[in-house]
Image: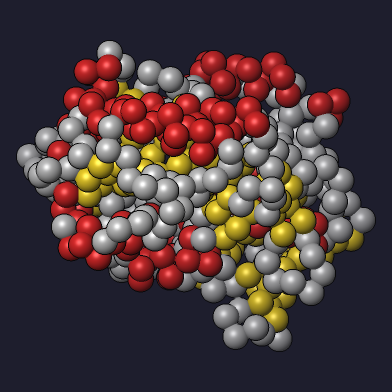
Amino acid sequence: MRTLDCQVLVVGSGPGGSTTACLWAEAGHDVLLIEEGDYLSVGATEPYSLDEMDRKWRNGGLTPAFGPIKVTYVEGRCVGGASEINAALYHPPLPDVLDAWARDYGIDDFGGRALAPFVEAIERECSVTPYPGSPGIASERIAEGARSLGWKSVQVSRFWKYGDGTSEGRRQSMTETLIPRAVAAGARLEPGLKVRKLHLKGRRVTGALATDREGRKVEIRCERVVLCAGAVQTPLVLLRSGITQKIGRTLTMNPMLRLAAQFGERVNQPELGVPVQQIEQFKPQMTLGCSHSSLAHLALWLVGAPGDRERMLAEWWRLGVFYAKVMAKARGRVRNVPLVDEAFVSYSLGREDLALLGLAAERLGRVLFASGASAVISPIPGAPALTSVADLGALRAGVEAGKAQITAIHLHSTVPMGSEARGCPADSFGRLRALDNAWVNDASLLPDTPGINPQGTILAIARRNVSRMLDR
């Protein structure tokens, strides 16, 4: 059996894990960074293609959360985690949300002002940059529709590095930024290893059991462990290790509806990546914007559409995919099922959440028609295409009745940080209360949904937490 030794074991190489491994290694510690998926560079697969979905996404991006209304969610499974598969859009943490978390969950030394230096550091080190050229036709459509309705929209910056004087560039994911820094500082990266459980002796972690791609066991010995495998896999490792109290019981998501829209002229420009325009009028409760519109994703979102799907796909350049995302109040749960390799995830949207989704779908439809869409494809399987604003009432009613296809790309809150009195299994800096030498440092720590793409928030909190770990 293969055996690995290290001082600091970091499980998961997404934004939280990459930050953790980089800063610990640069402080002179012996770091081992474990990742279940493969090492695939930014250019290894075509963005948003079937190949990328198969190689970089867990279960091809269609993992179900079970409940009265099915929600499918996305997890990255590759070196760099979600930073390799998301839109690379950057949203700074919302100070009001951070301040509310500090108050409501008893998080020490936290809030908008406390996190500001860490936000500034990630914006600088991860090349947060506005798009330098024309934002593209789809973005212009969103802006035009918002203006006609009197709603505010903005261009969102990206984790991106552009060439001098050009709009061409490269996504600045973790395999482009923090992971190379970690390796240069001496961290060892081991792709293709899945940590199954932690070895415990009293209140201390002594190591972990992992398996490689062929199912062979690998023993890892360590002095401390930082779990950064995401809001589903992190609690799963803890549950399998016998750490069960308050773990995995408070899962939050940002539910999302996608509407495909057809225009009279070209709107689809895959060479520009994901359009950067978003409507901010209703944030953080609701965000409306453009999604990725590759042929693979267009085919996916047109599956339930009646009519000539092949003809619509043949004119793919006239089609765009748009989304309505909401800040739901629902909570879910991550469970370990013996003898089953995957986590069992349950999530139950309530009437209030469905009503908010219905309102968001109606507002997105208004934007699309105001921007010149000739038809909007309903997210309700089998429903006819929408051809005017008058059809949006039926769309809203169908969503509120739970008939729409609902997805989620942002999961959080399964090991929330905060005070013991508020029921948080991790303290204000991510250390697990049940163990003396184990921390969590990923989306699991967020005590509630941030209402925005969480990558910037996760990076800033992870950096803050590692600074405290190193101080001690």
State the colouring used for the structure image: secondary structure
- Residue appearing at x 88%, y 51% in the figure: 203
Where does the image place residue 305, in percent across and percent down from the top left?
Answer: 37, 55
Residue 351 in which image quadrant: top right
Residue at 35% over, 56% down: 306
- Depth check, front residue: 352 or 211: 352
Location of residue 99 with respect to 411 vertically, above or below: above
Q: Residue extending furthest top?
A: 150
In the picture, measured across the screen, residue 463 lies left or right of residue 342, that is left
Name the residue: 55% across, 54% down: 72
Q: Does 204 appear above or below 330?
A: below
Residue 470, by quadrant, is top right
Tell me if residue 216 can be seen: yes
Q: Position of residue 404 (x, y in %)?
A: 51, 45
* Near-viewer residue (258 or 378): 378
Among all residues in the image, which is located at the extreme right? 202
| Residue 193, placed above or below residue 305 | below
Q: Is residue 408 visible?
A: no
Given residues 188 and 159, the one toward you in this image is 159
Q: Residue 17: give x, y in percent of width and height.
A: 55, 51
Quarter of the rendering occupied by the C terminus: top right
Tell which of 113 and 44 is nearer to you.
Answer: 44
Residue at point 37%, 47% (across, down): 384
Please state if 28 lies on the left or on the right of 361 as rendered: right
- What x and y, as percent, mark residue 257? 45, 42
Residue 351 position (above or below residue 282)? below
In the displayed structure image, the side of residue 439 where residue 147 appears, left or right = left
